[in-house]
Amino acid sequence: MAFKEKLVVKNIGLLISGDLENPVLDANTVIAIDGLITEIGKGKDCNLEEATQIVDAKGTTVCPGLIDSHVHPVAGDWTPRQSQLNWIDSTLHGGVTTMISAGEVHMPGRPKDIVGLKAMAVASQRMFENFRPSGVKVHAGAPVIEQGMVEEDFKELAENGVKLLGEVGLGSVKAGEEAQKMVGWARKYGIQSTIHTGGPSIPGSGLIDKDVILDADADIIGHINGGHTALPDEQIVCLCEQCGRGIEIVHNGNSRAALLALRTANELNQLERVILGTDGPAGSGVQPLGILRTVAMLSSLGDINAETALCFATGNTARMRDLDCGLIEVGRSADFVIMDKAQHTAGKTILDSIQLGDLPGIGMTIIDGLVRSQRSRNTPPATTLPETVF
């Protein structure tokens, strides 16, 4: 059967899988056909014939494209929160190839009536399905639930392609019992939910504490380290121990609380629950390097190997969010970030440098088997850059 595109990435020095159980693969070549990974192995054992594009990694590191589990998109590559254009493209230069909306809450005049919020959710889902800024996959259309919604509303949303709820608690539904009923309806129809955690972040939001979170039983404990204001330590520990849902750590939260959540998950031997987001754009701005910075922070201060921390931002999120990317596996989307240790870092290897708290230098991003960016304009310069052979 004829194919349109065949990508060969060869001479890989380190291949990060995204899988916590086996984070480093013994391979130096990855092949993708028409956007899907078809071979992983040693170059001498792979079929390199008929490539339409060859990337020479030149001994650098290939990792699954990073996934930002918590963003607030609006329309295309523009955010009114900071009146900024091209924030998604800039984040691509931070290695992020997939974004998950936690609600399009910054839309000017965001409708809060039930007909309006459903219409906006469907429109947002369609807009980002039809338009991918710089090739980045933005999973949007995440309505903020409001009082008065009934089961039929969630059924209708699901039938029209909506697969996410915006942060529970950013609308009028703030009581745990009420939220639990709506989260249950959403789950019944295949819609995944995230709940706001901590103090208020925007007008209309409020404190969401552990009791509300435990009652609501949403699929993801959104920004467990606060967005921005974190819950007391004992509540964070309680959520990790008693909830059993996804533990989302974000860049735009409390760093000390992030480390507490990570260490608690580690003590529970439940690191597979940890996923990463930025919670941007937000009042603190746009964070093009937010996922990389969170990886480096958790690794350097949280006693976690760098390759493990990278799995939080790739395979963990992919599995929890039911995505077809995030792991270097045959059949997965060919979404990669190619990077190397930054020039003049004290670390001897890229993993050493991340564990010292330094950011790697990104040399290329690939989405669906197509090169989307080359040397990053945002990260420090990489020691070695990959090269497109043809």
Image (cartoon, rainbow, N blue to C red):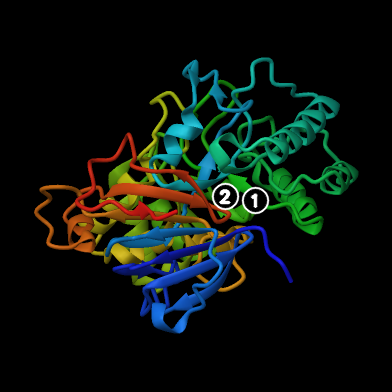
Among all residues in the image, which is located at the extreme bottom? 45
Q: Is residue 121 above or below residue 235?
A: above
Distance between the alpha carbons at the discs numbered 2 and 1: 5 Å
Residue 216 numbered mark, or none: 1
Residue 42 numbered mark, or none: none
Nearest the eye: 322 or 27: 27
Q: Which residue is mark 2?
A: 213
Secondary structure of the residue carrying numbered label 2: helix
What kind of residue is marked 1?
Answer: Ala
At 34% from the left and 67% from the top, the residue drawn is 12
Residue 195 horizontal side relative to residue 109, left or right:
left
Q: Is residue 246 above or below residue 88?
A: below
Spot occupied by residue 212 in the image (x, y as percentages of width and height): 59, 46
Dividing the picture into quadrants, the one containing residue 263 is bottom left
Nearest the eye: 349 or 2: 2
What kind of residue is marked 2?
Answer: Ile
Q: Residues within 10 Å of mark 1 (few under 14, many from 20)?
A: many
Spot occupied by residue 89 in the image (x, y as percentages of width and height): 48, 33
Which quarter shows the N terminus?
bottom right
Q: Residues within 10 Å of mark 2 (few under 14, many from 20)?
A: many
Spot occupied by residue 120 in the image (x, y as percentages of width and height): 76, 29
Dividing the picture into quadrants, the one containing residue 354 is bottom left
Answer yes or no: is residue 227 visible.
no
Q: Are marks 2 and 1 in contact (CB under 8 Å)?
A: yes
Spot occupied by residue 6 in the image (x, y as percentages of width and height): 57, 62
Nearest the eye: 70 or 385: 385
